[in-house]
Structures are given as C-alpha cells and as structure tokens.
C-alpha cells in the first residue's frame, strides 16, 4: 500500500494514475503504489506501457 499518494501521467494521452484511486477497472486496488503495479499494465486510455508514465507530484 502507498503511504503517500503519488500521481503519474501518461506521456501520450495525459491519463493520470493516482495511487489513492488505483485502477479498479484493471484490477488495481485503491492505495496501490505505482511501483507495485504489474509491469504489463497498460494505460486504460491509450494502451501505453507502464514505462510511459512520469511522476507529476507526490
């Protein structure tokens, strides 16, 4: 579980992954740290890979 809520933005479509919210539609529970998301997770908006996200705040 994330102790602080960081947010990460997709470089291609600007989708934001918020650790506090997770990605329930993809099976990622709220509170899941970005580092703990499986490496094969993809952006739900454009299909970009996890490596295409950058930390935007934290």
Image: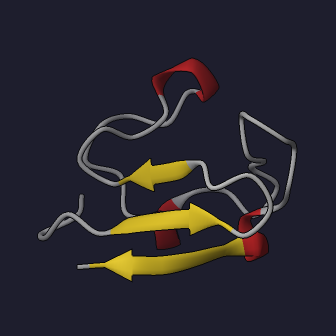
Comparing 49 with 37, the one in front is: 49
The residue lying at 46 percent from left, 80 percent from top is 55
Q: Is residue 20 above or below residue 57?
A: above
> Along the horizontal axis of the image, is 30 left or right of 42?
left
Q: Is residue 54 above or below residue 26?
A: below
Give the image quarter of residue 38.
Answer: bottom right
On the image, the x and y values in percent for residue 29 come to: 38, 34
Report the residue that reaches farthest toward the top: 25
Q: Is residue 56 above or below residue 27?
A: below
Comparing 43 with 15, the one in front is: 15
The C terminus: image quadrant = bottom left
Report the residue that reaches farthest toward the left: 3
On the image, the x and y values in percent for residue 12 come to: 80, 61
The residue lying at 29 percent from left, 78 percent from top is 57
> Along the horizontal axis of the image, is 28 left or right of 4?
right
> Along the horizontal axis of the image, is 32 left or right of 28?
left
Q: Give the colour scheme of this rendering.
A: secondary structure
The residue lying at 71 percent from left, 34 percent from top is 44
């Amino acid at each position: 579980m994330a102790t602080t809520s960081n947010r990460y933005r997709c470089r291609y479509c600007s989708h934001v992954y918020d650790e506090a919210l997770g990605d329930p539609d993809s099976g990622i529970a709220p509170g899941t740290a970005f580092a703990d998301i499986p490496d094969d997770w993809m952006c739900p908006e454009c299909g970009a890979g996890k490596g295409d996200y950058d930390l935007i705040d934290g």
